[in-house]
Image (tube, rainbow, N blue to C red):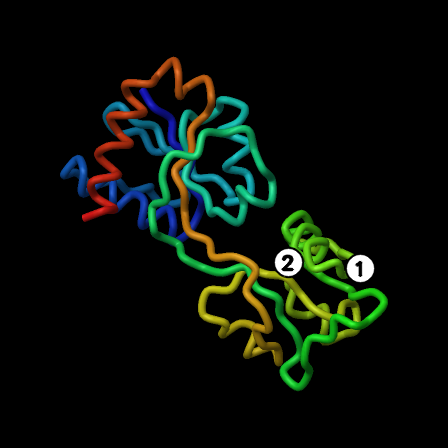
Amino acid sequence: MLTVALPKGRIADDTLKIFSEIFSDDFLFEDRKLILQKGNFKFLMVRNQDIPVYVTNGAADIGVVGLDVLEEHKPEVVRLLDLGIGKCRVCVGIRQNEELDYSLPEIKVATKMPNISKTYFAKKAIAANIIKLYGSIELAPLVGLADIIVDVVETGATMKQNGLKVAETIMDSSAHLIANKTSYIVKRDEVFNLFYKISNIVKS
């Protein structure tokens, strides 16, 4: 049996559609349940940020998680495949009526992704004071907590509604299939069998 960790929301739905297509069967979580058992698979419904923790520690053999989460946390997992779903960007956001000013002695950056942010501004040789937040990132520049934000953007609508705009794109992201390092060896046949089936679906 393979245990699969899926992030809550649209990526989980899109991933289960792929499984439905492969196995010609319905793969659906019942109302509010966090575990779905189907044939040789057990699916876990997990917060996006926690997927690498479940996979790294062997609670799940494989998982589906955004590239942005992988780049932020750099977990010790095997990256198997870009699924091409859950596409988004990690962007620098700023107030609508302002432009980026990297000449400041220090720039205050509010973000849920401190590691990606630190790396990005270090490469630009810009002194950045990273302020880690867990939500409502768009609020930070509006109340003077930060000069700019670094956040995940799908359409840019949330930024726009809150008086912000996308100033720069740091990276593109999409959902990736990852595997636990031990499972990749011990359950190699099962993992690769699934890998090839999913690969054929996402490439078609």
Between the residue at mark 1 and the residue at mark 2, the CA separation in whole angstroms equals 24 Å
- The residue closer to the viewer here, 86 or 48, is 86
Where is residue 113? Give x, y as percent: 64, 52
The answer to whether residue 34 is visible is no
The answer to whether residue 133 is visible is yes
The residue at the point 48 percent across, 24 percent down is: 59
Residue 110 lies in quadrant: bottom right
Query: How busy is the neighbourhood of tag 2: few (under 14 within 10 Å), some, or many (20 plus)?
Result: few
Q: Is residue 3 above or below residue 120?
A: above
The residue at the point 78 percent across, 64 percent down is: 108
Q: Earlier in the sequence, mark 1 or mark 2?
A: 1
The residue at the far bottom in this view is: 97
Which element type, helix, strand or loop, lies under badge 2? loop
Q: Is residue 154 above or below residue 196?
A: below
Where is residue 18? Give x, y as percent: 25, 44
> Nearer the observer, disc 1 or disc 2?
1
Query: How busy is the neighbourhood of tag 1: few (under 14 within 10 Å), some, or many (20 plus)?
Result: some
The residue at the far top in this view is: 186
Q: Which residue is mark 1?
A: 127
Identify the amino acid type marked 1: Ala
Quadrant for the N terminus in the image: top left
Identify the amino acid type marked 2: Gly
Q: Which residue is mark 2?
A: 135
Residue 24 lies in quadrant: top left
Residue 5 lies in quadrant: top left
* Discs 1, 2 touching: Cβ within 8 Å: no
